[in-house]
Image: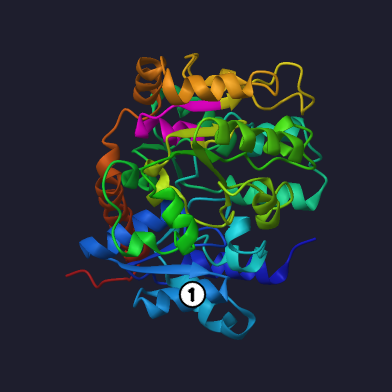
Amino acid sequence: MINELSFRFHRLSEKMPKERLVLFFGREEFSDNTKYLYLKALEQQGSFRCVWCSCEETLIAELQKQGLPCHLIAQETATETIRLFLSAAVAVFSVNPSQSLNGSEELFACLQGARQIQLWHGVSVKHLLLDLVQHLDITDYNFRRPVEFASRADCVLSTAPALDSFFRRVFGCKRIIRAGYPRNEVLLRPATEHEYIGSELPGAILSALLNPQRKKVLFAPTWQRGESQLLTGDINFITQLAKACKLNNASLFIKGHPVYVNQQDCKELSDTCFYINPSLDIYPLMTHFDVLVTDYSSIMFDFLLTEKPVMRLDLEGQTHRTFEPDFSLIPDIDFAYQYTDKNLEKTLKKALFKDDKKSLRKQMAKMLFPENNSDACSGLIELLNAEVDVVINENRAYQVEDYSRRAHN
């Protein structure tokens, strides 16, 4: 059954005059690749106008307070939102558009005349989008809607040749753009004042993070489909990790899903265990950590740029979905220490004090991020300028066919 509004807005979006306007979309919080590209584009003052769009009222209020151009997507701004979307030349995403737009078919239809650029949010060992059709139920609207939304991208970022075929396949997109991830810039240079928006830690946690007398361990498990059956989702494992950290004079910082652990749990575990809000943008703070512990989150690949050790869960014998994680999706380099509940303390001690995988991490980082990661945004801003030019020129172009009858002399 055709959604009349979506159908009309889609057609109107393809016909409406476009402005030199680039809209940026992200998560519920101010984070990820679009955040950093948006801020750099504002800083460089290119030939187009930038607007951050979000359904989150609190976030928009914060950006307005900082004097950053933004727009609240809400019922009371519906008409303004539709006009804004219909006039945009380019829309940039770093998560599924369905997430950024709260699943609105009508609002996404308003962007179909814009060039859609997908930066995505990390190197993946998960099967994504079109790859999941063979595993999940395509008749489920809540599955097929985000898959179809994401597959409309006009171009998709891939950081390295080793990843090109994966991103081509899962997005169904034939245009791959090469660049580093904008969010990774702050792993290699100091963050700016605006880049710290969304990264504010409570004073006690910040003091612990900056304490030079102790090592700092970041525990960041991945988001998983459905209920977690992995070791990393068990509070007993987190208790074990907290004890291992304390034995090694390390503070533990947990940035995980609140279903698995919360602030009260951390207080009860140890006085050197700290809970970081899952919505916080950790990237401007990531270089302060000495070791990353995860299961198979994409953060482990970005963390390689810090040159610090990575520990990932040894999934041998773990009960989980048969199709993920799939480490065949990335280069076969043994860059991470693998742990279980049996060897956790020993593995953590080695990673902290007897690290022997530095060269392998550098090798993996070079395979996944061969470009200039400290200035990933500049090339992408060139892309935005070029895409705006193309859309504007195509939008204004027309031809005249003259069939008038002329008198012959």
Q: Nearer the viewer, residue 15 or 3?
A: 3
Query: In the rendered image, which quarter is residue 138 located in?
Result: top right
Give the residue displayed 35% in from the left and 16% down from the top. 359
User: What secondary structure is marked by label 1?
Assistant: helix
Give the residue displayed 37% in from the left and 42% down from the top. 287
Query: In the rendered image, which quarter is residue 43 located in?
Result: bottom left
Amino acid type, mark 1: Ile
Outermost residue toward the left in this view: 409
Q: Is residue 334 visible?
A: yes
Is 333 left, or right, of 196 in this rendering? right
Rendered view: 112 above or below 238: below
Rendered view: 247 above or below 394: above
Give the residue displayed 43% in from the left and 72% down from the top. 87
| Residue 14 x, y percent position in the rendering | 49, 64
What residue range appears in magenta? 300-311
Q: Nearer the viewer, residue 236 or 250?
A: 250
The answer to if 280 sits in the magenta stretch is: no
Q: Nearer the viewer, residue 374 or 265?
A: 265
Give the residue displayed 65% in from the left and 64% down from the top. 102
Rendered view: 358 above or below 135: above
Outermost residue toward the bottom in this view: 76
| Residue 40 x, y percent position in the rendering | 29, 58
| Residue 330 x, y percent position in the rendering | 51, 22
> Which residue position is annotated with label 1?
60
